[in-house]
Amino acid sequence: MALLITFFKLIRWKNISLMIYVQLLIKFVLFPSFQVPQILTVLQFALLLSSIVFIAAAGYIINDIYDVKIDTINKPNSVIISRLVSKETAYKWYLVTNVLGVVSGVILAFNLGDPSLAFLFFIPSLLLYYYSKKLKGMAFVGNVLISLLIAYNVLILTYFEKVVNAQIITFILLLSSFAFVINFMRELIKDIEDIKGDYSFGLETLPITLGVYKAKQIASLLGVLFSVVVLYFLFGYWSNYKITLAYLVLFVLFPMGFTIFKLIKATTKSDFSKLSVLLKIMMFFGVNTIIIFSIYN
C-alpha cells in the first residue's frame, strides 16, 4: 500500500485527475449539449484517455528522476525518488507507464484505420523525455514546450472527434489558451522558487538568465494579455454568453488580477509557493467553464 501511495504521489495524481476531468467534461457534457456528432466509441475514448494519462504519468516520473539532486536542494522534504522509492524502481515505473501510454495510442490509431495518428502519441512521449533530460534547463524553451503539451491535451479530443462546429472550436481554443497561460505562469513561478538549486546545477531558466524581476514581469504580462482576451469576449459577446462570461469574470478574471498583483509584490519562496497553488485553483475553476457554457449556451 505504501508503494502504491508513493506511485500516486510521483505521478502527481491531482494533476492527472484534472486531465481526466477535462476530457470527461468535453466528451460527455460539452459535445452532447451542442449535439456534436461523435466519432469515438466509449472504448476508443477510453484508449485515448489511457494514452493521455499514462504518457503524462511517465512524464512526471522521468522529470523527477532527472531532478533528484536539484530537488534535494529546492524541496528536500518533498523528494520522493531515493527517499521513498529507489531510482531503479522509479525508472521501471517510467518504462511501464510510457509503454502503456504509447501502446494505447497505437491501438487507437489502428482501430480508427489511420496508423499515422500514432505519431500524436509518440511525439509527446519523446518530447516529455527530452524536456526532462535537456530542455527544462533552457530559458523559455522548456516553459513553452510543457505549456504547449498541456494545451495539446485540451485540444486532442476535439481533433479525434473531427469537430467542425465553429462555436465549439472557438471555445476549446480559448480553453486551451487558458491552460497554456496558467501553466506557463506556474512554470515561471516554480523556476523562481527553485532558482537556488537550478543555479547550483548550471540550469539556464528564465529567472537565472534574465533575473527574477523580469521573469515576474513576463508572467504578469502573459496574465494581462489573457485578461485582455477575456475582456474582448466580454464586450463583444456579452448578449450571447452572459452567464458564461459572468462566470469567467468572477472565477477567472478577478483571480487573475489578484494573482498578478500578488506576483508583482512576491519576494519569498513562500509567496511564490502560494501563487502556484492559486493558479492550480484557477485552472480548476477555468475548466468548469465547460459546464457553465454547456448548460447556459
Image (cartoon, rainbow, N blue to C red):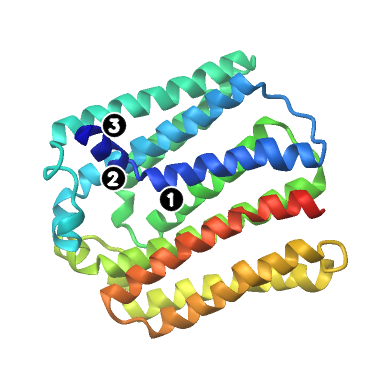
Q: Earlier in the sequence, mark 1 or mark 3?
A: 3
Q: Residue 112: image x %, image y %?
A: 64, 17
Q: In this view of the protein, which residue sits in the foreground, 205 or 183? A: 183
- On the rendered structure, is 219 left or right of 198? right
Farthest residue, direction bottom: 265
Q: Residue 254: image x %, image y %?
A: 60, 75
How much space separates mark 2 and mark 3, taking CA atoms?
10 Å
Estimate how packed mark 1 is, as few (under 14), some (14 to 19) or many (20 or more) residues with alpha carbons within 10 Å: many
How much space separates mark 2 and mark 1, taking CA atoms?
12 Å
**Above or below — where is 73 with respect to 154?**
below
Secondary structure type for disc 1: helix
**Above or below — where is 33 with respect to 269?**
above
Q: For the residue marked with disc 1, what is the amino acid? A: Ile
Q: Is residue 158 visible?
A: no
Q: Disc 3 marks which residue?
A: 94
Residue 60: quadrant of the picture: top left
Secondary structure type for disc 2: helix
Q: Residue 285: image x %, image y %?
A: 57, 59
Q: Earlier in the sequence, mark 2 or mark 3?
A: 2
Q: Any mark on residue 146, and which?
A: 1
Q: For the residue marked with disc 2, what is the amino acid? A: Asn
Q: Residue at x 35, y 62 (%)?
A: 139
Q: For the residue marked with disc 3, what is the amino acid? A: Tyr
- On the rendered structure, is 196 left or right of 188? left
Secondary structure type for disc 3: helix
Q: In this view of the protein, which residue sits in the foreground, 273 or 100? A: 273
- On the rendered structure, is 125 left or right of 289? left
Q: Disc 2 marks which residue?
A: 63
Estimate how packed mark 2 is, as few (under 14), some (14 to 19) or many (20 or more) residues with alpha carbons within 10 Å: many
Quadrant containing the N terminus is top left
Q: Residue at x 36, y 70 (%)?
A: 274
Q: Residue 76: image x %, image y %?
A: 15, 58
